[in-house]
Image: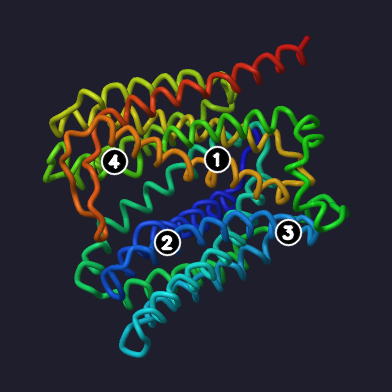
Amino acid sequence: MTKLKARTWASFLLIGLVGQFSWTIENMYLNVYLYNTVTQNTSYIAAMVACSAITATVTTLVMGVVSDRVRQRKPFISFGYLLWGVSVVAFGFISTEHLSIAAAAAAIVILDCVMTFFGSTANDAAFNAYVTDVTDGTNRGRVDAVLSTLPLISMLVIFGLFDGMTQQGRWKEFFLIFGLLVSATGLVSLFLLEKRTTPANDSAFFSSIVYGFRPSVWRANTMLYLSLTALCLFSVAVQVFFPYLMIYMQSFLQLSSYPIVLGVVLIIASAVSVLAGRFIDRVGKLRFVLPAGLLMFLGLAAMFFARGAVAVIAAGAVMMSGYLLVQSALSAAVRDCTPPEQAGQFQGIRMVFAVLIPMCTGPYIGSFVIARTGSGATYEDLGAVKQIPTPWIFLAAAAVLLLVLIPVHAMKRRECHADN
């Protein structure tokens, strides 16, 4: 196994975690900020979510290609984080004191797109490509096992230490703290990141953007697209239950201590992921997916039956540990199959498979299951009355998870043929 420098690990952890702080705020707090401080008209929230998703995908497609052509990731990461932080701070200065309700709401939606542009440039396009550049097939499993825990750690830190600040209405301080942290990380990365020159890619610009969507490219990179398909199906399975998990624990199970329960589950799962991550590269990514997937499947099945806090912690720990390990193995497999000279170019394609398609399908599958299995009990979310999630979302997710076996089996067959 190729050993990474302490400096490299430090850059992965700092840039990765701080980036996840920003994404947690973007995904989980901006809609609350808009609803609580500007308007209860949820059409603005829907517009913000849709515009942000489109901006993230298009930005990663375009800026990934640009970073390939410049042959440097560091400037995009460092200056991207610097401007990303500035855009986060700017949210705290939008209010209805100086703007009309419609203008303030529109300003938040537009600023969210600006924030997403800088974040996707720095994190989704450049940082993810940089990780691919500096790792190899002997250490990617371990690296992705660590990186996969960062979104959960981010949630724990923000929920545990800063959620009270938002409940008190101290939004300006909230955005200022994290905005300055993101910008400071950009400045630190100028000295922390090692300068690396990537292989030249001189293909035409527009051709490079649409390159990954061509059937001929799919045929030439079959293993890559099979690994992306597996990652996509896995991510769809996660989106079937994950958006409803906290609501399920709070409203269906009526666990008053659900933040503690969720925190314990995330800590256990993160520890398991870090400890087991070192075996992904030794065992092999594809071989590791099967036992990790079985672990997640068993955890999902157990969540269907779990009711009390202790049972939910046990089942949730199994489910989330399997989730992190499958994600780590599949993410590392995608990196292994990505052409080195086109690492940035394929980050946009990865976004389509890992983010856009799952987020546009998984939650709707979960919503459909809830509507068909619910008892009619409802809760209010940002002014909209919705049905309380039922345990059946976990079995639905388990059913979707089984589909991952199809592309993984196809990849294993191709590996066997290659060996022979």
> Which marked residue is nearer to the observer: mark 2 or mark 3?
2
User: Contact, CB < 8 Å: mark 3 with mark 1?
Assistant: no
Residue at the spot of label 3? 67
Q: Amino acid at mark 2?
A: Glu
Q: Nearer the viewer, mark 2 or mark 1?
A: 2
Q: What residue do we see at 46% from left, 18% from top?
A: 291
Residue furthest to the top: 420
Which residue is located at x 35 percent, y 44 percent?
243
The label on residue 143 is 1
Q: Label 2, on which residue?
A: 26
Q: Position of residue 23 (x, y in %)?
A: 45, 58
Instruction: Name the residue tied to disc 4.
Output: 245
For marks 3 and 1, the one nearer the N-term is 3
Q: Position of residue 378 (x, y in %)?
A: 18, 45
Q: CA distance from mark 4 to mark 1?
A: 27 Å
Number of the front mark, 4 or 3: 4
Q: CA distance from mark 2 to mark 4?
A: 19 Å
